Image (spheres, rainbow, N blue to C red):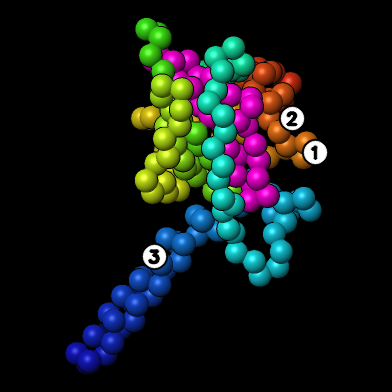
Amino acid sequence: MKGEGRTAAALVAVLLLCANLALAQAPDEEDVYGEDALPEYRPEPGSEWKELAVQLPSYPEASRLIEVELSLRDFPFTLFIDPDSLSVGKDRVIRYTAVLRSRTGAENISYEGIRCKNGMVKRYAYGSNGRFRLRHKPEWRYIEKLHGPDRYRRELVDHFFCPLPTGNLRKELLKRLKAGRSGLYMFSDD
């Protein structure tokens, strides 16, 4: 009897471990916006996602920045995106330079990438004094839902970048950014 109890407990432990491992891997494979169903985004059968090499853009010119309309309470910054840096690679990563400007004029500048498929972000470089500095080992991480420094990224994902448009990706994303949250290209606030 005692042996059967231990066997059952061991079996339950193994099943729980397997379930946790499956859940831990699921978010990276999750296709939140159904992009894999669209012919232009469908990966080759059996292929794994691979990030393309990153080329840093030119440093942003203040006169070219697009102000992004955010609806964040108590957010102490105005967000600008450099249109010249905006791109979507064959890896489906939206890359852009974000400029966060405080009410006093101080700026935080970073070159980032967002994956709509799984809601992840990677910061490739920081900008200051007219140049970018690469991060030592940038890594993909999940964008937080409501609080902290990811609030503007969550807005970009939910209201401007995702799901990826069809056609000329860069042009369509620029239209979304310029139209603002209340514009023609926006999605519901669900």
Magenta stretch: residue 130 in it? no
Q: Which of marks 3 and 2 is in front?
A: 2
Q: Tell me, yes or no, whether the two marked residues, 1 and 2, touch with CB atoms within 8 Å.
A: yes
Give the camera-side residue of 66 and 189: 66
| Tag 1 secondary structure | loop
Magenta stretch bounds = 76-102
What amino acid is at disc 2? Lys
Q: Earlier in the sequence, mark 3 or mark 1?
A: 3
SS for tag 2? helix
Q: Which of 137 and 104 is in front in this view?
A: 137
Q: Position of residue 108 (x, y in %)?
A: 41, 23
Write down the quadrant of residue 4 in the picture: bottom left
Q: Name the residue under label 1.
A: 167
Left or right of 8: which side holds 64?
right
Quarter that holds the C terminus:
top right
Give residue 128's position: percent from left, percent from top. Answer: 41, 24
Question: Is residue 16 shown left or right of residue 117?
Answer: left
Residue 93's spot in the image, x, y percent?
60, 44
Would you place residue 170 above or below residue 4 in this image? above
Mark 3 closeness class: few <14, some 14–19, many ≥20 residues within 10 Å: few
Residue 47 horizontal/vertical position (percent): 64, 66
